[in-house]
Image: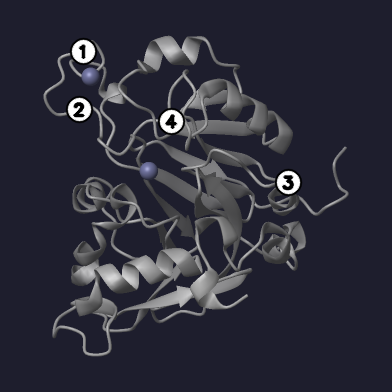
Amino acid sequence: MPSNNRNANHSAVDAASIVDGAGRHRHADTPPLTVTLLGTGTSTGVPVLGCGCDVCTSDDPRDTRTRCACYIRAGALGLLIDTGPDFRQQAFRENIDRIDAVCYTHHHFDHVVGLDDLRPFFFQNKTVMPCYAHPDTAAVLRRGYDYIFGSDPYPGAANVALEEVDGPFTVTSRHDDPETLPVDPILLHHGTTPAYGYRIGGFAYLTDVSTIPPASFDGLDGIDVLVLDALRPEPHPSHFSFDEAVANARRIGARRTYFVHMTHNVRHAEANAHLPDDVQLAYDGLTVEVPALEPSGSTP
Ligand SMILES: [Zn+2]
Ligand SMILES: [Zn+2]
């Protein structure tokens, strides 16, 4: 299809072709992961500016939610998913000292505008940092950040390289070690916008999703820990409601599922009490250990 015909509904990338070559066998050598949820809130963050509701004024720290992002440590290698507007403070809070690559879920403000705060990660180490993205996401980033991604970048701009991906890829080290990490993008529909989730080893991070295309489930085989978009109890055109998120979590069948991207309609303690034991709300700073995958077929 000519690229000028392409729009959000007719992306050149389809779920089945992405999953082709993906699956658990690619992740057999992935070490245990340490996953930190840097932010777990919807696009406004919680508290919401100017709001005096019970959740926005709650003294439970789990009711304060910065914008969604995730940091994964696999051996020495550090992988970041999204750079939202709170990225700088999140990186301070979690002492992030190493980023080998960034995986972008999609182009919306709450997932990308912290991009420029990657610059300090080049002060000591000038090695290029790949930023993996869906071709539609990459097109928006290239337009929006011409001074970084254009042909004549601003001196001192982050040495990042946009990598359009339409299938599994391998992250390599920017440091003095031989670490590598296989990553599979998982195509999601965020309303009419294509978004990527990412599978790494026994972990999958699926934020900003209202439909998981049927073929995408094939890439989620054997997932142990799942992070899933769950905006609020009420339906929304471009995010899962709680019921939709629970139904999709059941279909994926992870041992544990954590919800993210919640609004101020959601009080942590109260909402958690109504969810199944294996499906719980995440909160900012939650760190989860994900074991290496069992060899397939070894289930008792
Ligand atoms: Zn979002
Ligand atoms: Zn509020």
Label 4: few (<14), some or many (≥20) within 10 Å?
many
Give ligand 1's quarter of the image: top left
The residue positioned 74% from the left and 52% from the top of the image is: 215
Mark nearer the N terminus (3 vs 1): 1
Mark nearer the N terminus (2 vs 1): 2
Q: Looking at the image, can residue 179 be seen?
A: no
Mark nearer the N terminus (3 vs 2): 2
Compared with 149, 69 (above or below) is: above
Quadrant hosting residue 102: bottom left
Give the position of the N terminus as an image quadrant: bottom right
Question: Which residue is nearer to you in this view: 237 or 124?
Answer: 237
Task: Give how far across and how far down residue 111 sits, in percent.
Answer: 34, 52
User: Which residue type carries mark 3?
Assistant: Pro
Task: Give how far across and how far down residue 286 sits, in percent.
Answer: 39, 36
Mark nearer the N terminus (4 vs 3): 3
Question: How far apart are the alpha carbons under marks 2 and 4?
Answer: 18 Å
Label 3: few (<14), some or many (≥20) within 10 Å?
few
User: Is the CB atom of the residue marked by disc 4 within 8 angstroms of ligand 1's nearest atom?
Assistant: no
Q: Is residue 227 left or right of residue 82?
A: right
Q: Which residue is mark 3?
A: 214
User: Is the CB atom of the residue marked by disc 2 within 8 angstroms of ligand 2's nearest atom?
Assistant: yes
User: Which residue type carries mark 2?
Assistant: Val
Label 2: few (<14), some or many (≥20) within 10 Å?
some
User: Which residue type carries mark 1?
Assistant: Cys
The residue positioned 43% from the left and 23% from the top of the image is: 232
Task: Give how far across and how far down residue 112 sits, in percent.
Answer: 31, 57
Q: Which residue is mark 2?
A: 48
Q: Are marks 3 and 1 in contact (CB under 8 Å)?
A: no
Q: Which residue is mark 1?
A: 53
Q: Which residue is mark 4?
A: 282
User: Is the CB atom of the residue marked by disc 1 within 8 angstroms of ligand 2's nearest atom?
Assistant: yes
**Label for residue 118?**
none
